[in-house]
Image (cartoon, rainbow, N blue to C red):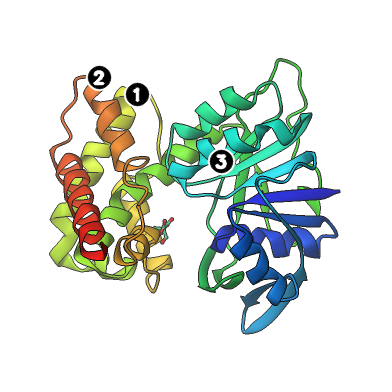
């Protein structure tokens, strides 16, 4: 069984190694010939450090422009890239190809599912921590677990895991309410990511009393939007859930902080942008979320100008 992986960042490489270790053939889909050559120079090896031990996986690689058929596709691109990348690859997808979307944000997964229907699509969220330290080289900071569930489940269809995922040496939980899990991740990211990006701090620093008022206000706004969308979040308050994640990932620089500092686009539109748009549609106010959305947009533009 072969899994093609779109998006060879930290999470893409982590799953490439996990799938290869479970006996699957893995093909990384890269954008450019230069990336292909870069991987060739590494003998097509993806390296993942887990608990101070390096795990090496030999993978195949193709550019997205290649033409071979795809039967199993894992999408780990940034949220803003996902839909375009999927549209570009869709002529290569077998009519019954299995597709797993592991991306931040909310809303784009449902659009991808529509574009790819009637193929079986799973969406997922992972609490595995991973940091890219070089091309195709990743340090895993926490094993975590991955919850996945079907987005488009026709009546009577089998609600199982995708091929090969039950044999991964990693906890994969089938979630019958994946939308809730996606919302939970969205809510956590909507608090931690813009705040760490704008304050230039690690996740754990948000535990300081200095940020408590901002955290509380943001959480209240997001809980209110979820509630008018009739979307249950956590069994605890969102603030408690955020504090727990900030503590468990205290040493992490959030993905938005990394992206913003490196001058790359961030996922602010698919995270905070989604929350603000949902609120607007329902006539709700989200002043602090809107302020953070505009502040991150402004910082992105400023960084862009600096780099030109
Ligand atoms: O998902 C994350 C991210 O950085 O995008 C968190 C949970 C905030 C961990 O850093």
The answer, for residue 175, to whether it is visible in the render is: no
**Image quarter (top left, top right, bottom left or bottom right) of the C terminus:** bottom left
The one nearer the camera, 33 or 96, is 33
Q: Which element carries disc 1, helix, strand or loop?
A: loop
- Mark 1 or 2 closer to N-term? 1
52 sits to left or right of 199: right
Q: Name the residue under label 3.
A: 85
Circle 1/circle 2 CB separation < 8 Å: yes
257 sits to left or right of 17: left
Q: Which element carries disc 3, helix, strand or loop?
A: helix
Q: How crowded is mark 2: few (under 14 residues within 10 Å), some or many (20 or more)?
A: few
192 sits to left or right of 100: left
The one nearer the camera, 94 or 201, is 94
**Residue for point 86% across, 48% down:** 1
Q: In which quarter of the image is residue 69?
A: top right
**Residue for point 37% across, 52% down:** 241
**Foreground: disc 1 or disc 2:** 2
For residue 282, which numbered disc appears in the image?
A: 2
């Amino acid at each position: 069984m072969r899994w093609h992986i779109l998006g060879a960042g930290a999470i893409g490489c982590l799953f490439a190694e996990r799938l290869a270790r479970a006996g699957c053939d893995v093909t990384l889909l890269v954008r450019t010939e230069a990336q292909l050559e870069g991987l060739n120079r590494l003998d097509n090896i993806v390296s993942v450090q887990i608990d101070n031990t390096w795990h090496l996986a030999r993978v195949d690689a193709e550019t997205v422009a290649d033409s071979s058929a795809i039967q199993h596709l894992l999408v780990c691109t940034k949220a803003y890239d996902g839909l375009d990348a999927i549209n570009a690859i869709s002529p290569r997808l077998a009519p019954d190809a299995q597709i797993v979307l592991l991306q931040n944000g909310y809303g784009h997964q449902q659009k991808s599912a529509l574009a790819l229907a009637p193929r079986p699509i799973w969406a997922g969220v992972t609490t595995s921590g991973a940091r890219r330290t070089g091309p195709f080289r990743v340090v895993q900071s926490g094993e975590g677990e991955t919850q996945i569930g079907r987005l488009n489940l026709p009546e009577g269809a089998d609600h199982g895991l995708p091929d090969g995922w039950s044999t991964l040496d990693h906890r994969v939980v089938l979630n019958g309410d994946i939308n809730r899990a996606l919302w939970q991740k969205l809510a956590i990211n909507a608090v931690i990511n813009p705040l760490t990006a704008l304050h230039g701090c690690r996740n754990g620093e948000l535990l300081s009393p200095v940020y408590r008022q901002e955290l509380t206000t943001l959480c209240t706004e997001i809980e209110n939007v979820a509630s008018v969308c009739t979307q249950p979040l956590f069994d605890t308050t969102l603030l408690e859930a955020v504090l727990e994640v900030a503590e468990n990932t205290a040493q992490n620089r959030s993905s938005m902080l990394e992206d913003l500092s490196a001058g790359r686009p961030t996922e602010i539109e698919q995270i905070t942008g989604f929350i603000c748009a949902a609120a607007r549609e329902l006539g709700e106010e989200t002043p602090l979320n809107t302020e953070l959305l505009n502040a991150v947009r402004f910082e992105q533009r400023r960084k862009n100008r600096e780099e030109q």
